[in-house]
Image: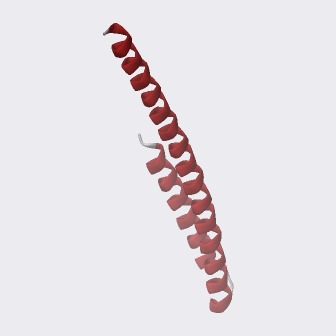
């Protein structure tokens, strides 16, 4: 299973659980809305951080693959040139 989908599912579950917990709390409506807004911002910040980490990881892997491909192409070019 795709790690990104699992992470998204876990975050969605946590967010839904927190929202339900807040909605059933015995607070006034304005306090509940403030709590929901704060939790939403916290989750959005956390998701943004995880997405940035994921993108950094993918970028590093991409750059590694590109570097290896260039090295391999240069080696093959050198081999072809030395053989002629």
Quadrant the N terminus occupies = top left
Q: Quick check: 76 above or below 47?
A: above
> Relative to 78, is 54 above or below?
below
Whether residue 60 is visible, yes or no, is: yes
In the displayed structure, would residue 3 be above or below residue 49? above
Q: Quadrant of residue 82?
A: top left
One can see residue 24 in this view: no
Q: Is residue 53 above or below residue 13?
A: above
In the rendered image, residue 37, in percent from the top left (x then y), is placed at 62, 80
Residue 75 located left or right of residue 59: left
**Residue at x 58% of width, y 62% of height:** 48
Q: Nearer the viewer, residue 16 or 67?
A: 67
Q: Quadrant of the C terminus?
A: top left
Q: Nearer the viewer, residue 41 or 78?
A: 78
Residue 69 occupies quadrant = top left
Instruction: From the viewer's perspective, tell me whether residue 27 is left or right of residue 4.
Output: right
Residue 41 lies, in percent from the top left, at 62, 73
Instruction: Count numbered badges in the picture.
Output: 0
Identify the residue at image location x=50%, y=44%. 58
Q: Residue at x 47, y 49 (%)?
A: 4
- In front of the other: 49 or 67: 67
Q: Residue at x 53, y 53 (%)?
A: 10
Foreground of the two, 71 or 48:
71
């Amino acid at each position: 299973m795709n790690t990104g989908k699992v992470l998204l599912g876990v975050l969605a579950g946590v967010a839904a659980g927190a929202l339900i917990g807040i909605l059933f709390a015995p607070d006034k409506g304005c306090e509940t809305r403030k709590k929901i807004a704060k939790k939403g911002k916290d989750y959005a910040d956390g998701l943004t951080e995880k997405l940035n980490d994921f993108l950094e990881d993918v970028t590093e892997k991409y750059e590694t693959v590109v570097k290896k491909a260039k090295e391999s192409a240069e080696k093959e070019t050198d081999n072809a040139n030395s053989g002629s």
